[in-house]
Structures are given as C-alpha cells and as structure tokens.
Image (spheres, helix red, strand yellow):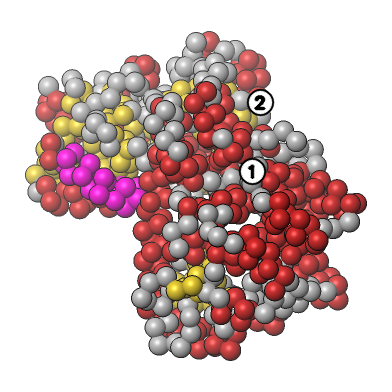
C-alpha cells in the first residue's frame, strides 16, 4: 500500500522539513479534502514544525487555524446553551464525538471542525429532553412522517434538531447503535461509566468507551467523506490514552461488555496499517479473537484501505468508488434486518431520483 | 509568459488539463473543457501570467458538466474546488460568471491572513480609496468609471487588508457589472472591454469588464488606504461627500466584512487601525463624470 503524503506526515511530522513545494501542494489539498487541514496545522505546531513551513502552504494552515479557533469558541457557547436548556432534567448530559473530544480537551479536538453536536441521554427521558430543548429553541425541522417514524422506531437517535436562532444542529442519542443492530449495546453501561468534566452537568464517555464509540461509529458508517479524519481521531485518542495505566486492558474488556469487539478490531487494524499506531502485543492478541475469517479479512482490507483514504483525487484508485459503495450497502446491512432494509433503500432511491431528498 | 501568448487551440488544450495562472498573491489552476470558459479567460485574463508546473497552487478549480445527460439536455455547469462542490449547478451560459463567483468564494473563505471587506478598492498617486457597499449601491459602477480614467484597480469585489502589515493587497480581476450599469459604462468609456454579457442570472444581466493591463501588471504592489467611502447611487442626486465619524465607520464597515467575526480580536484591531488612518465619508452621487472629477481632484 502506498501511503498518501497526509498519512506519512501524521506518522512522522519531521518529514515536513524536507518537502518540496509540489509535495506541500498535494499535502494541503489532501488535508483540505479530508476535512483535517486545521488539525494538520495544530499537529505541526505541537511538534514545532509549523514555523518551518514555506509561506505559501503556511498561509492556508494559518487560515484554517483561524477558522477552527472561531469554531471552538462557538462550540463552547453551544454546549453551554444545551446544558442550560437541560438544567432541570435529572440526567447526565453526556457529550459524544467531536463535542466530547473538545470538552474533555483531547488532543484530537485541536483543529477539529464539524457540523453537529451529539449528546447521549437515557431513552426514557427522550420526550422530556426534546420538550426542554424545544422550549430553548431547538426544533425538529423535518415534517416527513416516514423519516419521523424511521428515526423514532428504529434508530438510536431522534431526528436532528436545529436551533432556530443560530441554525446549529443537535443530535440527541439514547444509544450508540440503532435498535435494529445485531450487536446493540446496553446504553446504561455507557452512562454508568461516564465521567463528569466540571462542576456543571457536562459529562463524556469514559476514555475506553470514547474510543469504542469512535470505532463503532466509523465501522458502521456508510459515508466515508470524513473516514480518514475519523480514523485519525482513533489514532490520536489511542496515543493519548496509552499513557494511562491499564488502558489497553480495560479497552478490550469494555469492547466485550459492549459487544463491540469487531469494531475495535477493525479500528486497531486500520490505525496500525494506515497511521502505524503502536498497539501492545497483549491487546492485539486479545482483539484478534474477534478476527473475521481470512477471506472476509482480505475483502474488508480491500474495501477499507480504499474507503478510509482522504477523499481526494490523488488518493482515489480504480476501485475506490466501488469500495465506498459496497461499504455504504454494508452499513445498512449492519443497521437493519433485510425485511426492513429493502423497503428503506427502495424509498431512499426513489426520493433521490425524484429530487425530493432533503439531506 | 502571459495567457495572450497562447493561441486559442493552445489555451483550449491547457485548460482541458489545467491552466495555472497568477492573480495577485493567488495562484489558480483552472481546468475546464467548456468553450464559454475558454472565451471568458481569453477575453478577460489575457495579461495574466501563466505559471509553470512546479509552483504552489492555492486554488484548484474545475468547471464541468454535472452528468453526461446534462451535456445535451438543458446543459449545466458545476463549480468544483478541488473536488468539493460548494454550489448547485448553473445553466451552461453562466460558466464564465460562475468562475468569477466561485473564485470569490474560494478567496473569501480561505484567506484569513486578510481582513476581507466587501468593497471595491482603487488607487491613484499612491492614494487607495476603499468603497464598501451593499449590492445596488453603485460601488462597482463607480469603481469601473474610476478605473476607465486611469485609476489602478486593486479589486472591485473584495478588499484584502493584511492582518500583518495593514496594507491592501490587490486581486485585480474583471469588474462585475449588473443590468443598466453595463450600458452606462459601455457608453461612458471606449476603454471598457467586456466579456460575454449573460442574461437571466440570479443577479440579473451580468457583464464582466476587463481589468486594465497596467493594474494586472502591478498586482504585486500593495497599497496604503487613504480614504474609506460608502457610496450611494440615487437617481438625480447631487454629488455630495459627507464626513462620517470613525466609530460609525468601523461599525458599518464591519457589517461588510466576510471574516470579521472569524478573525475575532485580530479583525477588530485591523479594522480599527485601518479606519484610524483614513478619511471616512459617505458619498451620494448620480453623475459619474462629477464623481470621477471629485475623486481624481482629491487624489492629486
């Protein structure tokens, strides 16, 4: 496998010192398309290589940093507003994914720009939470009855909410996978292990669960526009948490408790193949118990090693489009049994062809 | 080597593989097989420098047809920024205009080394005048008239104020004129050269006036702002320049910035120091001759 220059720089930032302008050109392009340009800037800065970047690419890195700093500020305000809206609810307000990395000050949050805030609440409080958020200005803007029913009956989240004043987007989850999934985890395990961040009611999943959710999300994903970025989150979280004693042991244990061994296996496999993430031998051996058979493994490698590349023309090979398409089908396959999946996909295709699709 | 030294065939061939050229501080690589785009570049960009293959490119832009069917039935054009499609397709006739709008978007969203004001900026004798303005206030028309009278065009759409040194960096590009303004400028000056005029766009009829060759040649020379003037065209209005307080000017100019809030305190400081150094005015006018005479007088 020839690694894209973007992956090479994340593996060894020192190579940035010897890049020609033509290489910089390609690096910035791949990073921008992978939605990771600001993250690259912070990563180079942290490793003291940003100063040495030639002026032309540097102005793009700095420009992306400006944007990301502004984003971080708005994100904090958004989290504050959500927390205020839910202040009377007797629940833990648990942030997920990007918002959680930011609130927990994980390294991967530096320069990470995204569109939705995700939160996790107990399923039995969904109605009360939705009502409280509604009072504070977050509304569900889709009136399509099919979509409403699809989300509320089968999914692990309610239809996305939009703040009417700020046009920001909020996803309220009660679990990390749809109810129709074969390996539907017990979400109370996630909530019980959550960590409170400050005196306010803002929580994040435990370190191990944050990694597992990231893995579960990526390896059930149907669209890979941000696949490379999401894998780089995993790489960064794993590196950061490796410092904590027994992290790897707990990680494997949690993946068993939450039935997410396969996702964790893929996460570790592709992190080490693409980002050369160091994984201790013990953890490696334990997750390999969930290993797919060799034929399936070969097919999955073929698909994921293509789909997880930056979404840029320089990283696309002949089979990239097909790999992404097959993984899109796979994601639906994993989400629902066939008798639900077929009508759902038919309806989606019809909406797309007739131009009625909203998303 | 300038684009003008390429024959139409050579230009077509280059465009189909990616034509790299320089606009001020930005290096652009444009790929397109659409004949309209080739004509647009040939008419309006002939004095821009063609770049070699080993330079750093800021923006990779492609204009193409969305699908095979759309080549034949109601043909359309898609703008892509290195594979990212930021806008809905437009009718094919608007391909040249879409290049201009798309490039505006690229610069406005990816250049936070500048405070970017939605303003025309022109210079004479070292005095740069900045004309911020909401659409319809006649900023481009006024800018076109000044440029036809020997002023240097830095930009008709966005004023790039460097965060680092407070100077204004040029991006001289074709001036976009709408509806009646096109004929007003065509009648006003025989120096004005227009590309294809396109009807029924989202902004009405659009014509692009070529930037003066000299402005293109001086595109590396930043300028110091000396006046910040909010123009307002009103039919029959007398030519009138009214002083505006610095505070009001900062607030009004901030509304016209693309990235004022993204830049945070840097944006505030850059804008305050710009406004602090210049004369601030409101300007109402209806006669281009009087406006040009007034400003040329001030700059002399």
Residue at 60%, 85% (x, y): give it. Answer: A123
Left or right: residue A338 versus residue A274 is: right
Residue underneath mark 1:
A275
Q: Is residue B112 above or below residue A207?
A: above
Q: In which quarter of the image is the C terminus of chain A?
A: bottom right
Give the overall secondary structure of the magenta segment: helix
Q: What element carries label 2?
A: helix
Q: Nearer the viewer, residue A67 or A14?
A: A14
Residue at position x 42%, y 35% in the image:
A48
The numbered disc on residue B16 is 2
User: Which residue: 80% across, 42% down?
Assistant: A319
The residue segment tinted magenta is B256-275
* Residue B112 percent across, percent down from the top left: 37, 41
Residue toward you, B9 or A17: A17
Residue B108 x, y percent position in the rendering: 41, 42
Q: Which chain carries label 1?
A: A
Chain ID for label 2?
B
- Residue count near mark 1 (Cα–Cα under 10 Å), binned few <14, some 14–19, many ≥20: many
Q: Can residue B289 be seen in this view?
A: no
Q: Establish if A69 lies above or below B152.
A: below
Q: In which quarter of the image is residue A332?
A: bottom right
Residue A143 position (above or below residue B200): below
Decide which of A224, B27 is in the foreground and name it.
A224
């Amino acid at each position: 496998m020839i690694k894209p220059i973007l992956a090479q720089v994340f593996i060894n930032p020192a190579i940035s010192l010897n890049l020609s302008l033509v290489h910089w050109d390609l690096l910035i392009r791949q990073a921008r398309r992978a939605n990771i340009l600001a993250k690259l800037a912070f990563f180079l800065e942290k490793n003291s290589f940003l100063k040495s970047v030639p002026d032309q690419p540097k102005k793009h890195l700095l420009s992306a940093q400006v944007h990301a700093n502004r984003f971080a500020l708005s994100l904090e305000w958004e989290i504050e507003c959500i927390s205020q809206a839910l202040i009377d609810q007797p629940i833990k307000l648990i942030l997920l994914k990007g918002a959680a990395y930011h609130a927990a000050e994980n390294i991967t949050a530096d320069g990470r720009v995204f569109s939705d805030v995700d939160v996790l609440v107990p399923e039995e409080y969904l109605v009360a939470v939705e009502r409280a958020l509604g009072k504070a200005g977050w509304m569900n803007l889709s009136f399509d009855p099919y979509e409403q029913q699809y989300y509320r009956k089968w999914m692990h989240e309610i239809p996305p909410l939009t703040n009417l004043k700020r046009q920001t987007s909020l996803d309220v989850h009660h679990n990390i996978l749809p109810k129709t999934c074969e390996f539907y985890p017990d979400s109370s395990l996630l909530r019980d292990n959550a960590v409170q961040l400050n005196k306010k009611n803002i929580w994040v999943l435990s370190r191990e669960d944050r990694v597992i959710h990231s893995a579960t999300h990526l390896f059930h994903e149907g669209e890979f526009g941000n696949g490379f970025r999401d894998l780089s989150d995993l790489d960064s979280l794993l590196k950061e948490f490796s410092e904590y004693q027994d992290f790897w042991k707990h990680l494997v244990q949690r993946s068993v408790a939450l039935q997410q061994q396969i996702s964790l296996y893929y996460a570790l496999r592709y992190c080490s193949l693409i980002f050369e993430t160091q994984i201790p031998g013990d953890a490696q051996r334990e997750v390999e118990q969930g290993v797919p058979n060799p034929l399936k493994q070969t097919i999955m490698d073929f698909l994921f090693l293509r789909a997880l590349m930056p979404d840029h023309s320089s990283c696309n090979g002949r089979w990239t489009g097909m790999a992404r398409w097959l993984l899109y089908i796979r994601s639906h396959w994993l989400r629902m049994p066939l008798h639900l999946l077929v009508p759902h996909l038919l309806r989606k295709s019809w909406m797309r062809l007739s131009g009625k699709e909203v998303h | 080597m300038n684009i003008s030294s390429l024959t139409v065939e050579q230009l077509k061939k280059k465009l189909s593989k990616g034509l790299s050229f320089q606009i001020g501080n930005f290096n652009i690589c444009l790929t397109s097989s659409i004949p309209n785009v080739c004509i647009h570049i040939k008419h309006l960009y002939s004095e821009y420098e063609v770049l070699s293959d080993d330079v750093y490119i800021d923006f990779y832009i492609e204009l193409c047809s969305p699908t095979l069917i759309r080549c034949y039935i109601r043909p359309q054009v898609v703008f892509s920024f290195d594979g990212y499609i930021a806008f809905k397709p437009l009718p094919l006739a608007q391909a040249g205009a879409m290049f201009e709008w798309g490039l505006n978007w690229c610069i406005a969203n990816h250049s936070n080394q500048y405070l970017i004001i939605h303003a025309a900026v022109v210079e004479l004798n070292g005095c740069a005048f900045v004309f911020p303005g909401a659409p319809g206030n006649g900023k481009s028309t006024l800018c076109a008239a000044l440029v036809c009278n020997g002023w240097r065009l830095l930009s008709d759409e966005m004023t790039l104020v460097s965060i680092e040194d407070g100077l204004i960096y040029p991006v001289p590009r074709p001036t976009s004129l709408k509806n009646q303004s096109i004929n007003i400028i065509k009648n006003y000056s025989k120096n004005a050269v227009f590309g294809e005029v396109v009807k029924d766009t989202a902004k009405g009829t659009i014509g692009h006036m070529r930037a003066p060759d000299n402005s293109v040649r001086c595109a590396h020379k930043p300028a110091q702002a000396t006046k910040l003037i909010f123009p307002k065209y009103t039919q029959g209005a007398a030519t009138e320049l009214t002083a505006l307080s610095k505070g009001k000017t900062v607030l009004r100019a901030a509304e016209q910035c693309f990235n004022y809030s993204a830049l945070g305190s840097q944006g505030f400081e850059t804008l305050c120091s710009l406004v602090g150094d210049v004369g601030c005015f409101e300007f109402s006018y209806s006669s281009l001759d009087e406006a040009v005479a007034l400003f040329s007088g001030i700059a002399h």
